[in-house]
Image (spheres, rainbow, N blue to C red):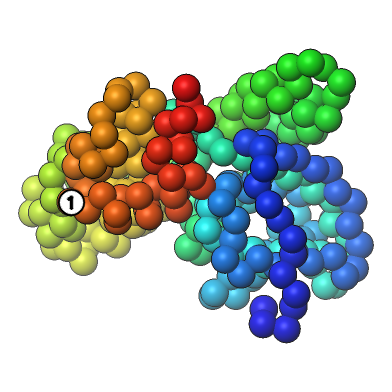
Amino acid sequence: MSEIAESPYQATRRLLTGHFHETSGYRAVRRRGVGDWLLVHTTGGRGRFGHAGGELIVEAGDWVLLRPGTPHDYGVEAELERWELVWAHFQPRADWAEWLDWPAVADGLMRLRIKDEGLAAQFVAVHGLLNSSHERREALAFNALEALLLGCDAFNQRGDRPGDERIRRAVEFIKDRLAEKLLIDDVAEAVGLSPSRLAHLFREETGETVQGHIEARRMQMAADLLRRTSFPVKQVAASAGFESQFYFSQRFKRWMGVSPLQFRREGE
């Protein structure tokens, strides 16, 4: 990406959307990513998302989600030279964290394949609401985006598969000990697996690493505490299993796109 100029972007609103019909030459590059989440749905043609391990080619029915801080390198797929997409940059509400836990293609880059015309139309409607003349257009669009993400979550089957009983026990073990120091060895011992076997099965069953799952649940807990209590950030960090307030704040900003204090202020 070093020869490509940075694409401008500045997050000034909690929701920004677009509906693009792009042709050959369109490419967005932001080496450090941005401070909010990015949702992209392909409605026609083909696009590409570059990542450290290669590239992801997307076509109609593909939904892609990028976490805050994930490098951006996306554009029209070279051979077809046409890409139609609907996109949204957004700052999530606290209780969206679990819905944003999609199967990972690469670090911070996730995808669901959903061929549902109703969901596609919902996304277009989110864009239409945000750009309408309605006095409460942002609130209406944000609520519509919430409904859209809930709709996408219904197609995320990782948690609904029968799966391995030991992995279900591992998930429960983690959920009950989020405030504690948790190592993969501790989880493995609790469910009777070696750490390497647990790591393999957990990724196979859930699409996440053990550590990634632990952090996702901790971030959900922290977001709830920030919104529902007046605990100092240091206490929120400790309650969510972080010994260092500074490290917690770094990780929280990577997940939510804003600092813990800003997240709390925006929820007031």
Q: Position of residue 179 (x, y in %)?
A: 17, 40
- Asked if 36 appears above or below 49 in the picture, the reply is above
Residue 141, position in %: x, y? 71, 25
Dot 1 corresponds to which residue? 243
Number of numbered discs on residues: 1
User: What secondary structure is found at the residue carrying circle 1?
Assistant: loop
The answer to whether 180 appears left or right of 127 in the picture is left
Q: On screen, 168 above or below 208?
A: above
How crowded is the residue under tag 1: few (<14 C-alpha within 10 Å), some, or many (20+)? some
Residue closest to the far bottom? 3
Left or right of 206? Residue 2 is right
Q: Say which of 194 and 99 sits in front.
A: 99
Residue 254 appearing in the image: yes
Residue at position x 30%, y 56% from top? 247
User: Which residue is at the front of the view, 13 or 62?
Assistant: 13
**Residue sitting at 54 percent across and 74 percent down?**
52
Residue 220 place in picture, x, y as percent: 36, 36
Question: Where residue 265 sits: x, y (%)?
Answer: 46, 30
Q: Is residue 214 left or right of residue 44?
A: left
Q: Does any portion of residue 151 appear in the rendered image?
A: no
